[in-house]
Amino acid sequence: MALKKGPTKGSGGKHRNKLKGYGPTPKAEDRVYHKAFKAKKIADRRKAADPRLAARRRAAKFTSDSDELVYGRNAVLEALRVGVPSLQLYLAARIEHDDRTREIVKIAGANGLHILEADRLEMDRIARSGNHQGVVLKVRPYEYTPLSQLVDQADRKAKAMDGVGGLARMQARPLFIALDGVTDPQNLGAVIRSAAAFGANGVILPERRSASVTAAAWKVSAGAAAHLPVSRVVNLTKAIQSLHERGYYAVGLDGGGNSLVGETGFETDPLVVVLGSEGKGLSRLVREECDAIAGIPISSMVESLNASVAAGISLYAVANARRKAAQKG
């Protein structure tokens, strides 16, 4: 007797042809008639109503993780007093005002800043911290000046003073300060302040392993960052090489220098003073590009000076050497 072909009863293949083309069975929560679908809808509505998530969504409209923020009443007030370029001021709703917050609002209003109110959860999200004291300031990113533009400005200023005799002409000689491996923004701010005080034409920073001009640096500079240009370069060694090509000399500061600051013989020339970090000093390649290495005589009880202190001393030494040269000339 011939055997029957095809699926037999109980094999599970009786209605197999009818199932072709339907694909895998959807999850229970994706089937509109299933109770898991209704449960998911209820959970989604509950999640959307969560005040913490709502605060996160509202905060995301105004800020991003890349924004630079200053928060806390004292910090924000100091930033506004010294003129840190800012975009927006966030205040907690129903904040209890004191003398600081009243002055903050007054300065912000005078500067035309947008003032936005936010609830406590929103403020926590904006500040990425709970220690904001109800005040957050969104700071404008600092605008760096290309090195070529910075050098052109210095050269034009020096040429404009060629016909002027004495100290004024000597003080107009181009002078830059470059930082090699200085990572503390407060040190950077202090260097900018010293550079402005002694008439430097600008500050040069490498892009990597270096502090940048943040709100912290701006505050320490006491507003000097507003009018003293800062340039960021990809490679500090190549930047010094390009300055050499334009007639500049480089003096590096290091404890093992072969001369004293202010006595290298390059002070009256177009000059870039290079400072290293407090711990490691100048990097090898940057050191090799310097025309002279100068030291600051200090007590043997102290291993090294803070970068901003060394900058102030070296810039004073250069200014003093130029003053003496003008008196002789």
Image (spheres, rainbow, N blue to C red):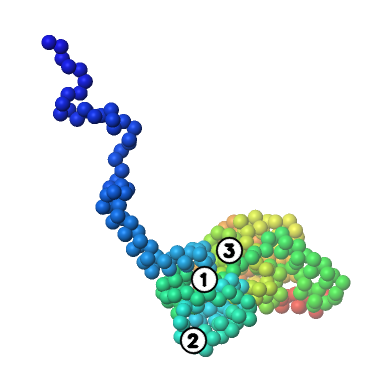
Q: Nearer the viewer, residue 213 or 169?
A: 213
Pick out the residue farthest to the front: 33
Q: Counting residues from the N terminus, which is met first, the one under dot 3 or under dot 2?
A: 2
Image height of 90 relative to 281, above or below: below
Amino acid bearing label 3? Asp
Residue 231 visible within the image:
yes
Residue 83 location, x and y as percent?
A: 62, 77
Residue 185 location, x and y as percent?
A: 54, 70
Q: Nearer the viewer, residue 234 or 57?
A: 57
Horizontal side of 53 relative to 214 (left or right) equals: left
Snapshot quadrant of residue 322 = bottom right
10 Å neighbourhood of mark 1: few (<14), some, or many (≥20)?
A: many
Element at label 1: strand
- In space, the residues marked 3 and 1 are separated at their CA atoms by 26 Å
Asked whether the residues under the numbered discs 3 and 1 touch, taking CB atoms below 8 Å apart as contact, a structural biologist would say: no
Residue 123 location, x and y as percent?
A: 45, 73
Pick out the residue farthest to the left: 1
Q: Counting residues from the N terminus, which is met first, the one under dot 3 or under dot 1?
A: 1
Of badges 3 and 2, nearer the viewer stands 2
10 Å neighbourhood of mark 3: few (<14), some, or many (≥20)?
A: many
Read off the residue under disc 3.
180
Element at label 2: loop
Residue 69 is tagged as 1
Residue 24 location, x and y as percent?
A: 30, 38
Of badges 3 and 1, nearer the viewer stands 1
- In space, the residues marked 3 and 2 are separated at their CA atoms by 44 Å
Residue 97 is tagged as 2
User: How many numbered markers are drawn?
Assistant: 3
Residue 1 is tagged as none
Please identify the quadrant where the N terminus is shown. top left
Amino acid bearing label 2? His
